[in-house]
Image: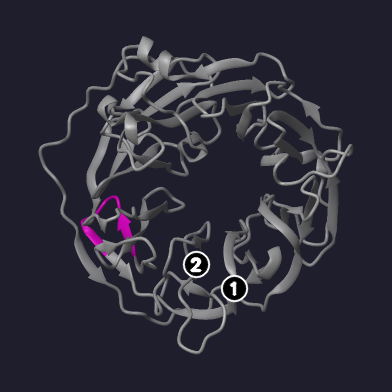
Amino acid sequence: MLTACGNISSELNTNTAPTSMSVFTLIEQTPTALPTETPVVPSLTSVPGTLFPLDELRMAYVIDGNLYLQDGSNLPIQLTYNGEDQEPLISDDGKKIVFFRGKSADHVYVINADGSQEQLLITNSLLNERGLRYDEASEIRTFRSLAFVPGTHILLFNAYQIDPHDLELKYKNHVYAIGLFLVDIDSGKIRQLLAPGLGGSFKISPDGNLLSVITSGHIDIFGIDGQVIRRNLVTYTPSKPIELFPVFYWLPDSTGLIVSLLVESQYDIGDMPTYAIWRYPLDGNMAIQIPLDPPPMGTDAHISPDKKWLIYNREPDEGQKGLPLYIGNLRNGSSNLYAVNALTHEWSPDNIHFVYEGNKHELFLGSIDKPPTYAGKGNFLGWVDTSHYIYASIPNMGNIMIGEIDGETINIQTFKLKTLSSKSFSWFIFVSLTSDKNK
């Protein structure tokens, strides 16, 4: 595990691929009945029916291009005054905020939670100065490519290099050569883990030691230092004419992946893709399919933190009105229709509850063993803990609401001078400042 104060070299990684490759045997799992199991609820969380401690909630958001930070119901603090800031990301301990600046989001900054020590962290020119082969034609952008190693101030990000001859296609269907980088946001030192063309979308394992990286046709496993752990853990045939990448998740104990693979190799605009769910262990050569019936369709699916449940949508069957929502059991392959006119959102950390969206931004609280209940109206923002979820009310996006399972709703006013629309109030993110995270 890298620590927040680690000294990181800026030297290039020159690892080469191993000479041998592992080939998986794909085995379809037959649905089987499982004994009744009582879900285990994590102990370090609040209990339903208790008042949420607002001083544990740290929020960062953008108003008219400026970054604000707010603790609970305290008054917000304006951190930046540039007018072009967006997409903040808070470290686990709540002490650092990383954000993009500029209309093209090609500069990454970091600032302390008290507004001090604002520093430019990543630009194309900085990478180029270090001899990392990124020029002004390259782009470093998209919030999804920034991620903290759990419990540290180490940030991973993708950089996208555009061929200079492809500049006329910029902001269209241009082709990127993707690299993978690591930066210590305390020291500013950058290290390239994977050179342009060798990187791809990534996910960090729960223990913070491994990376799963997807490139066209395969998923590889690396150490957090860029060392090759396993090439071609997952292989697949890229779809044509449009390549739609698989969706993949780490198992909670970091011993393997759950992967959603396209059933068909053809995908074009307007198609609704069908997926098959597979389990790939790191220490074996046997992948097991979880045969959900009906299978998931589309990319809007969410898996529970313990990787035992999946909520997903698919096209309505004949005579069915509204978009159906299914709950799939990933242990035995069974699935059940749960609701209609429902868009999936996120699971609670207790692996029992989830939030989904109905018509006109109406939010509902779902459960693996109970019918849904109305939760409020607004844009869902995430789960604070096992008992509390957070959303922005409509039409005033500045009203942040904390709802409780079987409990009351708390209204946090973030900005009291005016009613805020989605155009002026954006990029909301939060972190829970529990005592364990501050140690």
Instruction: Name the spot of residue 399 as percent of width and height, x first.
Output: 81, 48
Q: Amino acid at mark 1?
A: Ile
Instruction: Name the spot of residue 387 as percent of width and height, x first.
Output: 72, 58
410 or 84, nearer to the observer: 84
Q: Amino acid at mark 2?
A: Trp
Q: Is residue 285 magenta?
A: yes
Question: For residue 349, which quarter of the picture?
Answer: bottom right
Q: Is residue 29 magenta?
A: no
Left or right: where 133 falls relative to 252: left
- Residue at position x 68%, y 25% in the image: 83
The outermost residue toward the front is: 168
22 or 113, nearer to the observer: 113
- Residue at position x 27%, y 22% in the image: 13
What residue range appears in magenta?
277-287
- Residue at position x 30%, y 57% in the image: 280
- Residue identifier under label 2: 309
- Residue identifier under label 1: 368
Left or right: where 50 falls relative to 133: right
What is the basis of the colouring in this image? one colour
Inspect this view and state whether residue 39 appears.
no
Inspect this view and state whether residue 323 appears.
yes
Real-space CA distance between mark 1 and mark 2, rounded to the nearest whole angstrom:
9 Å
Judged from the image, the secondary structure of the residue bearing numbered disc 2 is strand
Compared with 121, 356 (above or below) is: below
Main SS of the magenta segment? Answer: strand
Instruction: Name the spot of residue 110 as percent of width and height, x first.
Output: 59, 22
Q: Are marks 1 and 2 in contact (CB under 8 Å)?
A: yes
Question: For residue 89, which quarter of the picture?
Answer: top right
